Each structure stands twice: as structure tokens, then as C-alpha cells.
Image (tube, helix red, strand yellow):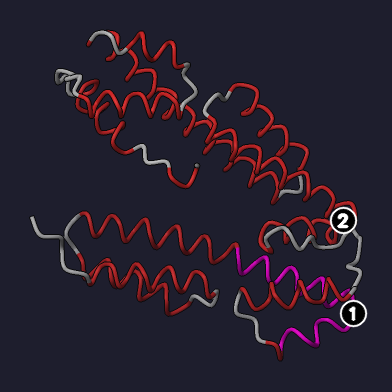
Amino acid sequence: MAAELDWEPIRALGRRVIERDEPLELSDEVRALLQRSAEEVALSPEDVASALRSVPTAATLLREITRRIDEGSDRLCKAQLQASDLQDAGDLDGACRLMEEVLAVEVVPHYRRIAESELRESTRLKSVAASGQPDPKLSVRSQLPVLLHRVQQGQPLELTEGMRAFLRRAAADVGISEAETEPALASPESAGALLGQIMGRFRDGADRLENALSRMSELRDAGDLEGARQQLREWLAVEVVPRYRRAAEENLAALDEPPPAL
């Protein structure tokens, strides 16, 4: 169900009625949209049926739907960003608490499912932190700071076959060649250094991504498409992480597409 959610129609209706003060017309289409969206934000069928009996109460229903969508989105996004920072700093308990706080107040099922998934991931990461071994069910990127934090706390990597496979996959993800990776797997010390190098590439690449896209957007919105393209070309000239290179190439291709017909 989460993958099928499309809240743009209800948001567009909210912009027209709430922000621009246009009259709400209770057509069959609008009634169906309000009823469907109300269900998606966990409003009871009885309350919805009552609200749809008149235009004023339907407008109040619309406000409540959009409030739940917008406030839930803001709350979840803020918690996700803070939890990611805490995970990178090694504070997995703090990351878990943030999602528990979201779940304590969130009523929208879609947001609750995301928060529950994030909480399960943070809980699994705590097991990675305790064991020092990667979890094949978790992403490489989420586990890197946890394992690196252990190394920085003086706990060397245990070079099991699972750990070696994890490091090979992680190194490939940031564009480190097999010729560079294999010698580093000879000892816990060199493997720990490789882990730090991998994490550094991810962090540096993410910073370049954010800066380049921000500057590109500014130039594009100002009408300077060539300047926007140049930002992406300069990014590509130094980026080594494949996923970030693909992001740059996709954005560059999008800038070369003709504008949509009016």
C-alpha cells in the first residue's frame, strides 16, 4: 500500500482551498479523494462520513488530512536526519529513541511503517556493533560507521570470510579497485584502515553531491543552464564513487532535455 500512495492530488486541493481560499466543490471526485486520503491518514470512517455532509465540515476534514500528512512528513524527515547523524556518531541507542518518539505520536500508517522499519534497522545495527560482524540484511552504508566506530574504540576487525566479503563489496561501492582492496585484507590493521578510507569516500562524496546539486539548482533556476551544467561537469571530474557519478550523469542528462511543451 505504501508504494501506491499519491498525496499530490490532496495536497493540490489543499493549496487551492486552504492557501488560495478557493471554494470547495463537493463533486463525486472530490468526495472520493477526501474519503481515500482520510483513510490513508487514519481518520475514522464515521468521522469522514459526518464531515462529508456539508462543505464547511468537508473543508475542515481537508485541513486535518493535509495537517497530518505535512506534520507527519516533517516529523519523520527530521527524525531520520537526526538518527542518521547519531548512527554515524555511534549512538545507536539515541537513533532508536528518535524513532520510538515518532511512533509514540504518529498516527499515519505510512509514516509509522517507515519509522518501524528505521527502528528495526537501528536495532539490527546494535547487534552489528556488539558482534563486530556485518549483517547481510542491512545496507553496506549503514554498517560502515558502526564498524568503524568499533575500530576507533580499539577493537580490531575480525577478518572472517563474511567480513572480507563485506569489505570487498563496500570498497567496490566507492570505486576502490580489487588491486587496492586485496592487500588491505591481509591484516586487521590494514583492513581497519581500508574501512576508514571507504567511509571517507562516502562522506566526501555525499558532501560534494549536496553542494553540487544545491549550486546547480540555483543556477538552473536563475536561467543559467550552462553554469548549472558546468557545476555537474566539475563534480564528475573529481567524483570516484559510482553511485554519486550516476547521480551527476542523470542530473546532467536532465539539464539537456528539452523543456516540457506548454
Residue range in magenta is 180-202
Give the residue at x 51% y 60%: 207
- Of 41 and 131, nearer the camera is 41
Magenta stretch: helix, strand or loop mostly = helix
Q: In this view, does 162 lie to the left or right of 173?
A: right
Residue 187, label in figure: 1
Q: Residue furthest left?
A: 262
Expressed as whole percent of the image width and height from the top left, the position of residue 254 reads 28, 67
The quadrant holding residue 83 is: top right
Residue 198 vertical position relative to residue 64 in the rendered view, above or below: below
Expressed as whole percent of the image width and height from the top left, the position of residue 139 reads 67, 60
Q: What residue type is labelled 1?
A: Ser
- Of 51 and 203, nearer the camera is 51
Residue 129, label in figure: none
Which residue matches tag 2?
153
Give the residue at x 50% y 42%: 2
Q: What residue type is labelled 2?
A: Gln
Q: Does the magenta segment cover residue 196?
A: yes
